Structure formats: C-alpha cells, structure tokens
Image: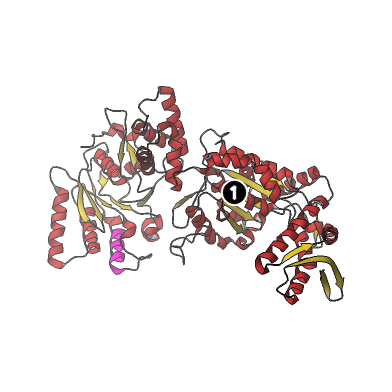
Amino acid sequence: MTAPTLTPEHIKDLPNWLREIDVALAANPQVAITGNLRDFVILPRPGTPHPRFATVIEALSTLLSIAGHSCQITFDIVSGPRVLHDNESGSAAAVLSQLDRKASDSGTTQLRALQQLLESVAVSERPMCLVIDNASRLTPGPDFSDPEFHRVLVVAEKLLSTARRNPVPGPHITPLYNTVFWLVDQENDLPHWLVATDTVRVVSIPAPTFGQRRTAVTSLVPSLPGGVDLDPTAREAVIESYAAQTNGLTLRSITEVNRLAIDRRIVATSIEDAIRTFRVGVPDNPWQDPALKQRIREGAKYLGSRVLGQQAPIRKTVDILIRSTTGLTGAQGSGDSSRPQGILFFAGPTGVGKTELAKSMAELVFGRKDAFIRFDMSEFSSEHAEARLIGAPPGYVGHNTGGELTNAVRHNPFSLLLFDEIEKAHPRILDKFLQILEDGRLTDGNGSTVYFSEALIVFTSNLGVYRTDSQGERVPVVSRGRPYIEIESTIRAAVSEHFTKDIGRPELLNRIGDNIVVFDFISPRTAEDLVPMFVDNVTRRVHSISGTHISVADSVIQQLVESACERLDFGGRGVGTIVETMLVNPLSRALFEMDISTAHATVTAITQDSTGWMVTLS
C-alpha cells in the first residue's frame, strides 16, 4: 500500500527530531542521527485519525520528500547502494548505474563504493541526498584505523567545505545542501574531528514520550481481544493505563506487546499482564497466585519463627507483601507503576536478624532459596566497581559478560535482592538505584534494559548505631536497654542525615520513603529462645553426620543462656559465638575421641580451665 502523501503543512505534526533535520537541510551539509534509531516513528496519515508507523529511514525519506528532495540514495554495508526515492528524471538511478560500471571495471569494495558515492552526491549539480544506514557497522573494529574506512571519513570531512547547494522545488526559500546523513548508534561512532564541527549537525532521536505512546496504543487497543466492545469510558481507561505502563518501551516494543496479547488471548482490560510478560518473559504472575496469598496470611507467624524478637520489622514487612499481592504497589502515583514490588531499608544493630529476615522473605514469597540474591556493598566502595554491577561499557574488557546485578535479575526476575551494608557503597554506585527504585528498570553496559518490577529490594545498614568521635574512636550512639521508640527515632534520623548531608543523595532517600524498618537489640528473652534453637541445630548436625544422638542437659542450656546474655550487644551472632565457643568446639573434640559406636550421649556439664572449655559426656 502506498504511503499517503504529506505536504509542507504537515511538518508541524512531525516529531521534533524530524523538524530539526528540516531546519538543518539549508545549513548543514552532513547530519549525524543517533539515539532511538530502530524504533517506529509516528507519522500523520491524511484523511484518517489513525497514524502511520514508519521506520526511521522511511520517516527521513518522507521529510526529504516534503522538502522537495525527491532524489534519495541509501547505503549500508550489507546491501550496498540503492535508490531510496527517485524522481521522474531518474537521477539517483543514473548515479548508481555509473557506480556499478566503475565497480565492475576495478573490483571496487563496498567502502570504496561508499567513498565514490559520497563524492558523487556531494558535488552533484542536481538536488540529491545520501542516507548511510548502520554507519556504526561499516568496520568491525572499535576505532577508525581501517585504511579504507579512514579514507571514507577523510573524504567526508573534505566534502564539508565543498558540498553543493542546489535550488530545490519545495517550501524552502534558499538552496539546500545535498545532505549526507549518518545513522550511528552513538555520536562517538564517528570521529570527533568529523562531528565536532559547526557544519555537521548531530540529531538525537529520543525515546517515545507519553503522548506518542498514547497515540500509538489508541490505534492498537481495538485489535486486542475485547477491544472493540469497550464503551468509551472503559476504552479511555485502558488507553491511559496502557500508555502509562509502557513507560521505557519503544513504539516497536509496544506493537510486539500488542501481538503478544493477541497471541495469548489477553483481553484489553488485562493489558498489564501482556506488558509484564513481554518485560520478564514469564507468563505466570506469582504475585497473583492464591497460594502466595495464603502463605502471606501466615507470614507473621512464619517470619516470627525464623527471626526472634523483632515484631515491629516483621509487621512492616508483611504489610509490604500484602500490598504487593493486592496489586497496590505504587498505586498512589498518577499512573500504573513499574516500581519493584517492595522496597525495604533494614537498619539497626549488627546480628539482630536483618539478613535472616530478608532470606525468610524470599522463601516465603518465592518458595525457593535461590530467589535470595545478596550483594555485599563493601565490595563496591570504589567508583569503578560499578562495572561489576551492570557490566563494563563497550570497548572495555569483559563488556560482553554483563553485570552481576543485571545478569541475576535477567535470569531470575522474581527474586529478592539484598544489598548488605549499603552505606559502604560508593555514592556514584548508589545513583544506579535511583532508576531501579523509581522506574523499575536499569540499562546494562551493553545497552540492554533489565526490569526490576517483579523483584523485592532490601537494603541493610548499621547507620545510627555507632559514630566516630573526635579521637577517631568508634562509640555507640544507641545502646541496648533504651526504649525501642527512642532507638527507632535515632536511627531514622541518622539514615536521613547520611543520605541528605553526608553523601548528598536526598533523592535516593525520597524513593525509599517510609520503608525504613528499624530493628531492636536482642533482648535476654530472645537469647533464651535462641540458645535452645542453636543447640538443637548442633545436635541435629551431629546425628546426621555420625548417627549419634546428643542430648544437652537443661543446666547446660541455662549456663549458655547466662553467658549469651553478657554478649547481647553483638546480637544473634554473639549468641551463636557463645554456643560455638562453649559447646560446639569442646563437643567436637570429645566426639573425635569418643567410640564411634556410641549411639547416645548427654552433655551433662561444660567447664573451663586454663586450656579452654570442656564438655562432660555421659
């Protein structure tokens, strides 16, 4: 079907980047076009309210035709030169015919043909334009050292000062250049000595705006299952939701979402399911699984059995999970949000269960241990460690391998991501979380987009627990025994001060919002519960390895509890250290020396002498 003819009066309806090129036709002999090159472009379709979806090449050709440039040639390294559009005189075909004769006489390579084509177009006495498609692929190397390619670029530079301007029948009053267009992935795919001049204009094609996405989906909704049956109010609601949820997607991707919805019979009112499936590649939505809702109903009990003495953090965590399963994440915003399903900032003393609660959340929600992915942010204290998270940029060693974070989410979008000791990360690395927390996506070193919209994000931190005094000593700010409300307010204030004043990232704190969860110190009552739990773990391990049943006398457990209560400032890890030092180490020694045929033994006492702790077995 022939594309409808556009006239100069339609230029005002074209995207801004095309209008910028229209301005450049009389002022710049060469134009470098970069940005969103592989997307569709929305062009008006005279006589109908429905737009036309065109490629960038087709849109550029349409603009040139409106301007009166009816003789257009395109070139790419695969197909070589060909006519893009020609007038009745056949000027473009004549130029290519002449090049073909030269090539047959001398065995010209593609790059040599491009050089000759550049020279022919630039000095032609007839109005003519050349579009070099995929110019970033003209040579396989990352630089401009290939002799033939370098000569093409040098010729292009020389032609900047010798390019002709010819009268063109159209809306422009002054003569127009025989413009050469370079379509490149990035501006630096051409040497700076070519593009960094006043005579070469660089035009960037941006990602589609909300208005452009809305225009696109308006024409697509009727093709969805049930789309034509929607009443005007329902259709408008679907269009608004569709356009809002496709933020970050190209127009080409939106058309693919539409095809996916049609293929999987997803009705128009459930278009968010098609968008999510397109982004993460998984058709099922575990967040809407009835089994998950049932597990979360028992969530406080389950998490409370794994993390002792932290009722307030557990209650806050369960509230976040309930919000996610009801689909209300980000519901306070004006549009449908693609933010992560949950964002939590666990703060408090060491060893009180922050990491354990994150692990338990992952198992509760996703039902598997491999859904828990931990990043120790002390390993990302240097600015250059960013490459480990998202991958090295092109041209650097390892850029093809991707980043640890982006790879993990790409392979497992339904997961819990724990960023441990976040305050130790370099502030430049923290900037990466701005896009993750706000838009639920991140671009890796290769330029691919990774979506975090199905993940849980958990940060942990010890901010506000200690400070460095004037002598450089680390002294506690909060201590065990103070009321929880006082501990919570002190730690929250320290977290706020760190992000706003210390590192100057208040926008990151704003995205975390009120999801700062403060953990309390381990209490003696919690220690009384932890010690038997740790002892049971030890006895089960002994039985699984050696088959020996070990019992521990109540008096021994009480002795361990009393010692553990003296180390509560170190949290659960301090309790575990006491059990290891007083029970596990001497028990290991006793079992090593014991007759392996012993089926049962009881630890009746633990004692200490100058050599260390010992157990008495009977």
The quadrant of the picture occupied by the N terminus is top left
Asked whether the viewer can see residue 485, the reply is yes
Give the residue at mark 1: 457
Residue 553 or residue 62, whichever sits in front:
553
Measured as percent of width and height from the top left, residue 95 is found at 16, 54
Measured as percent of width and height from the top left, residue 238 is found at 43, 30
Residue 552 or residue 424, whichever sits in front:
552
Residue 113 or residue 373, whichever sits in front:
373
**Left or right: where 581 falls relative to 516:** right
Measured as percent of width and height from the top left, residue 441 is found at 50, 48
Q: Is residue 477 above or below residue 583?
A: above
Q: Disc 1 on helix, strand or loop?
A: strand
Query: Does the magenta-highlighted stretch encompass residue 358?
Result: no
Q: What is the quadrant of residue 217 in the picture?
A: top left
**Left or right: where 580 falls relative to 104:** right
Report the residue at 86% width, 71% height from top.
Answer: 608
Q: How many numbered markers are drawn? A: 1
Report the residue at 61% width, 38% height from top.
Answer: 322
Query: Does the magenta-highlighted stretch encompass residue 156?
Result: yes
Q: What is the quadrant of residue 135 in the picture?
A: bottom left
Report the residue at 31% width, 31% height from top.
Answer: 50
**Which color scheme did the rendering employ for the protein?**
secondary structure
- Few, some or many residues within 10 Å of mark 1 (<14, 14–19, 20+): many
Residue 397 or residue 342, whichever sits in front:
342
Q: Is residue 491 above or below residue 536?
A: above
Q: Which residues are magenta?
A: 138-158
The quadrant of the picture occupied by the C terminus is bottom right
Q: What is the quadrant of residue 132 in the picture?
A: bottom left
Disc 1 marks which amino acid? Ile
Measured as percent of width and height from the top left, residue 412 is found at 50, 53
Report the residue at 56% width, 34% height from top.
Answer: 331
Asked whether the viewer can see residue 196, the reply is no
